[in-house]
Amino acid sequence: MKNTKVKWLSILTAGLLLAGCQAEDSKKETASTEVSTTKQDADSHSHESEHNHAHDEEKEKVYAGYFEDSQIQDRSLSDWEGDWQSVYPYLLDGTLDEVFAHKAQQKGDKTEEEYKAYYETGYKTDTDRIVIKGNDVTFFKNGEAYTGKYQYDGYEILTYERGNRGVRYIFKSTEPKEGVPSYIQFSDHSISPNDADHYHLYWGEDRKALLEEVTNWPTFYPSKLDGHAIAHEMMAH
């Protein structure tokens, strides 16, 4: 009887030891899995961060005008759809003076006054608002609205004096109409389909002549923004 009791105690002890080892092994395996998962997560975040950084760098290069022809893609008028206002009135009333002071301080190649004179030539226009919806483009000028329909007419690549480049996306009026230009050309620092946050617009009757215009580029931002918001947007670039 005594031997049987000892035998059962031995079996029970061995069972407890085995269970304890299995539990310990399970804890180690769980800990190992957690470490492995954590490392995978860290690697994933690292790769994602590197990808985003590379994407941002590429975007900045394109914005500055440095890109390959193979990167350029066609775009539709919907990229510029919306209600847009000219920034020229904000230059005239002094709202954008902080932008010119910022540029003078950051770049140092022109004084604040010289920057203002440069942009006064660039922004100058008598069209204070543009609304784009579908294929319709409406120009607001001197209290009058002129609407025309436009179709895509390709893009042109321009090379500037300092070596960087730009892309003009061109749309042609589908029918002659009073107050509506035959051609409009968008430039917004993008070279592929993208919802514009602002743009420079050139318009007139001669497609080729417009491509030679590089000193006057009326600039438009969403009409919902006030002048100070636009100024801060400009200083962010």
Image: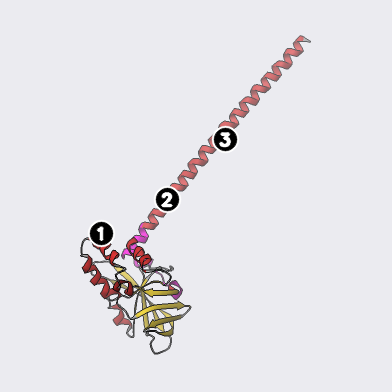
Residue at the spot of label 3: 30
**Three-letter code, disc 2:** Ser
Q: Considering depth in this image, is 122 or 169 the residue closer to the camera?
A: 122
Q: Under tag 2, what secondary structure?
A: helix
Q: Does label 3 or label 2 sit earlier along the sequence?
A: 3
Among the two numbered marks 1 and 2 on one chain, the one whose residue lies closer to the N terminus:
2
Q: Locate residue 65: give its quadrant.
A: bottom left
Residue neighbourhood size for the residue with mark 1, other residues' Cα within 10 Å, grouped as few (<14), some (14–19), many (≥20): few
Residue at (43, 81) in percent of width and height: 137
Was residue 195 drawn as part of the magenta stretch in this picture? no
Percent x, y for residue 183? 37, 82
Report the predominant secondary structure element of the magenta stretch: helix
In percent of width and height, residue 15 lies at 68, 22
Q: Nearer the viewer, mark 1 or mark 2?
A: 1
Marks 3 and 1, the one that precedes in the sequence: 3
Residue, disc 1? 106
Total count of labels: 3
Q: Nearer the viewer, mark 3 or mark 1?
A: 1
Tell me the SS state at disc 3. Answer: helix
Whether residues under marks 3 and 1 lie with C-beta atoms below 8 angstroms apart, the answer is no
